[in-house]
Amino acid sequence: MHTKKLKIIPLGGLGEFGMNCLAMRWEDDIIVIDAGLMFPESELLGVDIVVPDISYLIENKEHVRAIILTHAHMDHIGGLPWILNEIKVPVYATEFTLAYVEDNLEENQLLDETELVEIMPREKFTIGPFTIEPIRVTHSLVDAVSLAIETPVGIVIHTGDFKIDLSPLDDRPFDLHTFAEYGKRGVLALLQDSTNVERRGYTPSERAVIPRLDEVFSQTKKKLFFSCFSSSIYRIRIALDLARQHSRKVAIIGRSMMESTEIAQDLGYIEIPQGLVINPGQVRDYPPEQVMVLISGTQGEPMSALSRAAVDNHKHAHIDAGDTVVLSSRIIPGNEKSIFRVIDHLYRRDANVIYDDGSNGLIHVSGHGSQEEMRLLISLVRPKFFIPIHGNYGHLRRHAQIALETGAVEHAIVIEDGDVLELDKNDARKKDKVTAGRILIDSGSSIDVVEDLVIRDRRILSEDGIVLALLAINKRTGKLQQQPEVVMRGFGGADITDEARELVIKTLDGLSKEEKSDYGMVKEKVRVELKRLIQKTTGRRPMIMPVIMEI
Ligand SMILES: [Zn+2]
Ligand SMILES: [Zn+2]
């Protein structure tokens, strides 16, 4: 006899970091948890973002009932515009997450046509055969939830991202009680965040950075530039509090930082006293020791405010000798090169640079739980089946091992993107596979990441061609050693090679000496300019690869 099964189908984030997306299906009803993106590795030149292949959802369009989001990080919500372009379904999320989603959808002209539903911790809602309870968890940003999903074969808990911060800055505690209650009732499956599976012990509270940062504020005699992820609301709140205590006015620079602080202020997560914040243009009106600049760009993104300030190319952010720059964030693997390039520029300006290298004290803490927190949650929930999520294959395997060692789970099952896991009350097994993979998207701009969704899969890549711009730069003078070479392949029509070469020369002429020494920035500027020209004259969007040869 055919018995009905619950299907768990990860489409992103299992086997890699980022673009988290997971489908859950019962008969003809599908819900989707998270819709994330991934920022491309530097090898994927000309590509702005990476999103999961959602062929499975498109093929089953008429069955998809909703997308439910756990929190507002881009690796959980950034793929939304792309998915909503293909399938029109309501989006469920908490208040803060929805505020981010609204911004994101508005930029993509999807806001008006999308139904947004606000959810609250401890308030159950029902979608088809699923009854879902959001459970409050703590993370590096606010208003994050896990989801307890009642299905016809049992309860499935999806943790989203979490750490167990026992002294959260917003006094909204991790709801351990509810996890324990579910544990008592009996949980069929626990899907748990694996991000920090390699770290022993506990992840410190968001508060743990305060003492060292306070010290930095005390020791800084000139301007203080403070940079963190714009979504790290707690960190921003700490920086604002310290600025006030140390009698510094605050200028907020960088689009994402401004948007974030505005949302957080609107929703009551940060309080900005009258007179604390000044316009970026007013920085020069104050003595340096009375200013803090909150600035975006911790990962050395070539066009970010901090990267530009580092080469003295920002209208309002001028970094002078003796200023201090704090990078209160981690160095995301893959970004080392661009980050250290920015750090070098900052040192050349004779700034003091404080970043998370282990020797500068605790200026950053992770938003993800370490091993003991993972064990704790598993022990509370005591699921029959444990399924690690969010991580490389190796992380998932280790997490499964840790879960088994607690003695609190019966089985640990490692699945990857595209696997279909079928569950009933007693059994869980991998069945077939569905299409899964990465889709590369080129937005046409490095700043507005998802402004215009163009699919960059291989097929289109081969149709739209490729452009190489070869620049021979004299290391000593920073000047072009010879005429740049522009090679275009894969698209016929008008020959614009000469025009393109002229444009490259013009672009380089427009750069300051310092900008020229930053090859990341040179490449980015050349890429953006060429893209504009080619799109305008040919309507094509080829992959553009500037290559610099140092002579
Ligand atoms: Zn997160
Ligand atoms: Zn995440």
Image: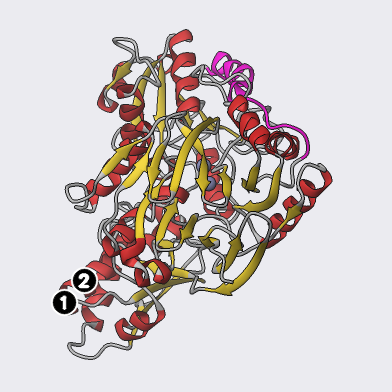
Residue 77: assigned label: none
Spatial CA span between label 1 and label 2: 6 Å
What residue is shown at x 80% (from left), y 49% (from top)? 404
The magenta stretch is 200-220
Quadrant for the N terminus in the image:
bottom right
Using the image as rendered, state which of residue 533 and residue 7 is in the foreground.
7
Position of 37 relative to 470 (above/below): above
Residue extending furthest front? 1
Instruction: Report the colour scheme.
Output: secondary structure
Using the image as rendered, state which of residue 482 and residue 127 is in the foreground.
127
Say whether residue 486 is visible: no
The kind of residue tagged 2 is Leu
Position of 549 relative to 276 (above/below): below
Residue 201 is covered by the magenta coloring: yes
Horizontal and vertical percent position of residue 265: 33, 22
Position of 177 relative to 370 (above/below): above
The kind of residue tagged 1 is Thr
What residue does disc 1 label? 537
What residue does disc 2 label? 533
Quarter-wise, where is residue 416 in the image? bottom right
Residue extending furthest bottom? 492
Horizontal and vertical percent position of residue 294: 41, 28
Instruction: Name the dominant secondary structure of the magenta segment.
Output: helix
Q: Are marks 1 and 2 in contact (CB under 8 Å)?
A: yes
Using the image as rendered, state which of residue 271 and residue 219 is in the foreground.
271
Horizontal and vertical percent position of residue 275: 29, 11
Quarter-wise, where is residue 459 in the image? bottom left
Callout 2: helix, strand or loop? helix
| Residue 479 horizontal side relative to residue 41, left or right | left
What residue is shown at x 74% (from left), y 40% (from top)? 371
